[in-house]
Amino acid sequence: MSVVARWNIELIATCPACGLDVDLTNHPDFWIDHDFGVAIGRQRIAAFCPECETRITVDTE
Ligand SMILES: [Zn+2]
């Protein structure tokens, strides 16, 4: 029996203003700014909360 595997990539940051879990991979600039061909290290990502539009600066680990 074989099955097909599905990728499910998300990078969650909690909005400091409203507490919403924001998936940074939904941010349109994310895939332009981050090349997953290189090792993922600590990076600073600028994003915004889709709920309350607070600008968020995120440090990835
Ligand atoms: Zn928010």
Image: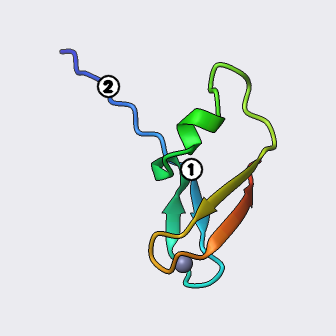
- Neighbours of disc 1 within 10 Å: few (<14), some (14-19), many (20+): few
Per the image, the residue denoted by label 2 is 5
Q: Give the residue at x 33% y 30%.
A: 6
Residue situated furthest bottom in the rendering: 18
User: Is residue 4 found left or right of 21 in the rendered image?
Assistant: left
Q: Is residue 38 above or below residue 19?
A: above
Residue in the foreground of this view, choosing between 33 and 2: 33
Q: Is mark 2 within 8 Å of ligand 1?
A: no
Look at 32% across and 25% down and name the residue there: 5
Image region (quadrant) for ligand 1: bottom right
Q: Position of residue 20 (x, y in %)?
A: 50, 75
Q: Which residue has dot 1 on it?
A: 11
- Whether residue 18 sits left or right of residue 35 in the image: it is left
Q: Nearer the viewer, mark 1 or mark 2?
A: 1
List the single residue furthest toward the right: 42
State the image coordinates of residue 4 (x, y, percent, origin top left): 25, 21
**Coloration of the structure image:** rainbow
